[in-house]
Image: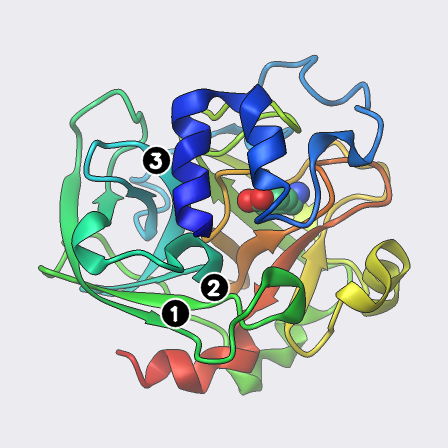
Amino acid sequence: MAATLHRLRSWLGAALAAATLSMACVSVAEAAPTPTTDGEFGVQIVGGTRASTSTYPWVVYLATSSGFQYCGGTLVAPNKVVTAAHCTEGDSASAVRVVAGRDDKNSTAGTVARVTKIWIHPSYTDVTRGYDVSVLTLDRNLSQTPIKFATSADSALYAAGTSSTILGWGDTSSGGSASRYLLKATVPLTSNSTCASAYGSRFNATHMVCAGYTQGGTDTCQGDSGGPLVAGGKLIGITSWGDGCADPGIPGVYARVSTYAAQIQAQL
Ligand code: 4AZ
């Protein structure tokens, strides 16, 4: 369902998408006034810069069989990709492509793998209830280097203020259009209390971690879902949800990978 909506969005454009995605995502562009940081600079994730898959070989994107990018993902083994459950929910494996080593969506660089199995966390229902985790098995081993993911031993990586990296090919402003190129940005992890102040009971610290500057301006956005939040050289989060993108006081929300480490490991 959600992946289908992501695809519809690709086809029909951002304006229609705002209405369409309101069913799958918790919020839409009109949830908050568009800040001056949105759109004015015409760059990145929101507020980021271009990045190369040579530097971040484990970042991948999910595409339809027609080649439309609709989510991100992270290579955690040569043939295993971690992504968001809301990216793969309702999909058949045969419909999903994983694109690795391609910075520019309008190029043919890198490798397009097929998917032979989709695992979705069995407790997943919707993003605000947590469990927004999915593992894809690929039809081949990729040459790109995987990244390690956080486990219960990595609680230090989740400390408030930790500098983290977000990556993706998603929208460069709230309600805007997707990036042609891989983009990256650095955002600090927020405290749990800061995130609870923004989201109330929708935020669950066991299942989620938030990141963003108090002043906004830098964030993941629609189309970045499923992609990586990295700190200390490990995958610590999966881009999951948020109210709008990059608004002051409204951080992005990420699935807390350490909570799911054993279940992810069991899929490898
Ligand atoms: C989404 O709908 C989405 N600003 C991803 C990230 C954020 C909001 C929405 C965080 O895919």
Please tell me whether residue 219 is drawn above or below residue 12 in the rendered image. below
Disc 2 within 8 angstroms of ligand 1 (CB):
no
The amino acid sitting under disc 2 is: Leu
Q: Position of residue 231 (x, y in %)?
A: 56, 60
Which residue is farthest left? 140
The circle drawn on residue 22 is none
Disc 3 within 8 angstroms of ligand 1 (CB):
no
Mark 1 to mark 3: distance in Å?
A: 24 Å
The circle drawn on residue 235 is 2
Q: What's the residue at 79%, 24% (across, down)?
A: 34
Q: Position of residue 37 (x, y in %)?
A: 76, 22
Q: Position of residue 151 (x, y in %)?
A: 50, 81
Q: Earlier in the sequence, mark 1 or mark 2?
A: 1
Residue 130 quadrant: bottom right
Residue 29 quadrant: top right
Mark 1 to mark 2: distance in Å?
A: 6 Å
